[in-house]
């Protein structure tokens, strides 16, 4: 066949001989270059850890440094193969633009992740409310924030939704007020109920004595008086206090024979 002619084989052999050194050099640049990049990234990561840089930022900066340096290696290898680096960079730019247009939402989450890592509205371990979800921050990724809910569920929230809404950081200060509500019958004495509930809160583990727990009247319902109950706790003890105070108030009111009033209905049998 024509394509297996002696002339074609000679031309192919000549091209292979000419390209072999370039190809071998490009492969060596890739292998050695990527190894050097990995070593440099490890050194940079150790330096960042020793410098006391925030542990949430270190993985992000390390990955960005790795990508940029490996891109430099790829451009250098392309140059050894005879590919014009300007054209190669232009091609990468066009490819990046196309990917960016296709992934606008994803890039938005990326930009939001950068903002969160830089401005630190919350950090790992904080109790937060994000996009209507409450939980402890388990991980801050470039694209998502991961929460652990009180039900021990893993909640993944895109960072774009986080920065586009209200961020409530319940761990921003050294203590937090926990808002509870209790109903009191109209026949009961408020000062007596107030005293019982305050004593219950003071006796509940992890409730702080300063600021002092509070009990006040919120509103008057049709059948009960609605009370606001405010214990204070450290942010990490939020749920322990939330459930503990509820449980202990119920036990204390039962012990004192205090009941919540509900409407009573008389069922009248008609006919027969």
Image: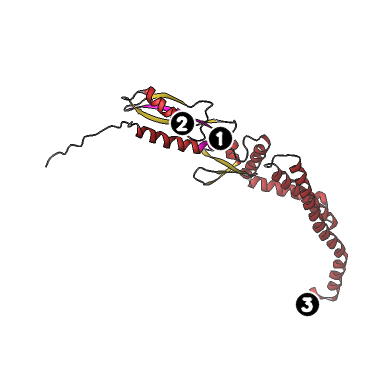
Seen in the image, is 251 located left or right of residue 7? Answer: left
Badges 2 and 1: C-beta atoms under 8 Å apart? no
Looking at the rendering, the stretch of residues picked out in magenta corresponds to 224-238
Relative to 240, is 23 above or below? below
- Judged by depth in the image, the label closer to the viewer, 3 or 1, is 1
Residue 11 pos. (x, y %): 86, 69
Badges 3 and 2: C-beta atoms under 8 Å apart? no
Relative to 31, is 13 above or below? below
Residue appearing at x 38%, y 27% in the figure: 226
- The tag earlier along the polypeptide, 3 or 1, is 3
Question: Mark 3 highlights which residue?
Answer: 1
Badges 3 and 1: C-beta atoms under 8 Å apart? no
Residue appearing at x 83%, y 62% in the figure: 23
Magenta stretch: includes residue 157? no
- The tag earlier along the polypeptide, 2 or 1, is 2
Quarter of the picture containing the N terminus is bottom right
C-alpha separation, residue under disc 3 versus residue under disc 2:
95 Å
Seen in the image, is 17 located left or right of residue 252? Answer: right
Question: Mark 2 highlights which residue?
Answer: 201
C-alpha separation, residue under disc 3 versus residue under disc 1:
81 Å
Residue 102 pos. (x, y %): 63, 47
Question: Mark 1 highlights which residue?
Answer: 235
Q: Nearer the viewer, residue 267 or 161?
A: 267
Main secondary structure along the magenta-highlighted residues = strand
Which numbered marker is on residue 7?
Answer: none
For label 1, the SS is helix
Assess disc 1: are there few (<14), some (14-19) or many (≥20) residues with their C-alpha within 10 Å of its C-alpha.
many
Assess disc 2: are there few (<14), some (14-19) or many (≥20) residues with their C-alpha within 10 Å of its C-alpha.
many
């Amino acid at each position: 066949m024509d394509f297996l002619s002696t002339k074609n084989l000679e031309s192919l052999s000549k091209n292979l001989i000419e390209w072999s050194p370039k190809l071998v050099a490009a492969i060596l640049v890739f292998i050695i270059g990527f190894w050097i990049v990995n070593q440099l990234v490890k050194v940079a990561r150790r330096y960042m850890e020793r410098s006391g840089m925030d542990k949430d930022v270190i993985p992000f900066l390390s990955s960005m440094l790795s990508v940029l340096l490996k891109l430099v290696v790829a451009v250098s290898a392309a140059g050894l193969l005879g590919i014009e680096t300007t054209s190669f960079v232009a091609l990468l730019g066009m490819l990046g633009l196309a990917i960016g247009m296709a992934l606008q939402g994803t890039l938005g989450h990326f930009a939001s992740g950068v903002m969160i890592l830089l401005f630190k509205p919350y950090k790992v371990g904080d109790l937060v409310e994000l996009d209507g979800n409450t939980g402890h921050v388990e991980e801050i990724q470039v694209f998502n924030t991961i929460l652990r809910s009180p039900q021990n569920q893993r909640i993944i929230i895109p960072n774009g939704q986080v920065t586009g809404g209200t961020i409530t950081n319940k761990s921003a200060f050294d203590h937090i007020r926990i808002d509870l509500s209790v109903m009191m019958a109209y026949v009961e004495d408020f000062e007596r109920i107030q005293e019982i509930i305050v004593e219950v809160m003071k006796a509940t583990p992890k409730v702080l004595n300063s600021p002092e727990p509070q009990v006040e009247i919120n509103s008057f319902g049709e059948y009960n008086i609605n009370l606001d109950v405010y214990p204070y706790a450290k942010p990490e003890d939020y749920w322990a206090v939330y459930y503990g105070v509820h449980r202990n108030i119920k036990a204390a009111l039962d012990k004192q024979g205090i009941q919540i009033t509900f409407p009573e209905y008389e069922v009248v049998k008609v006919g027969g």
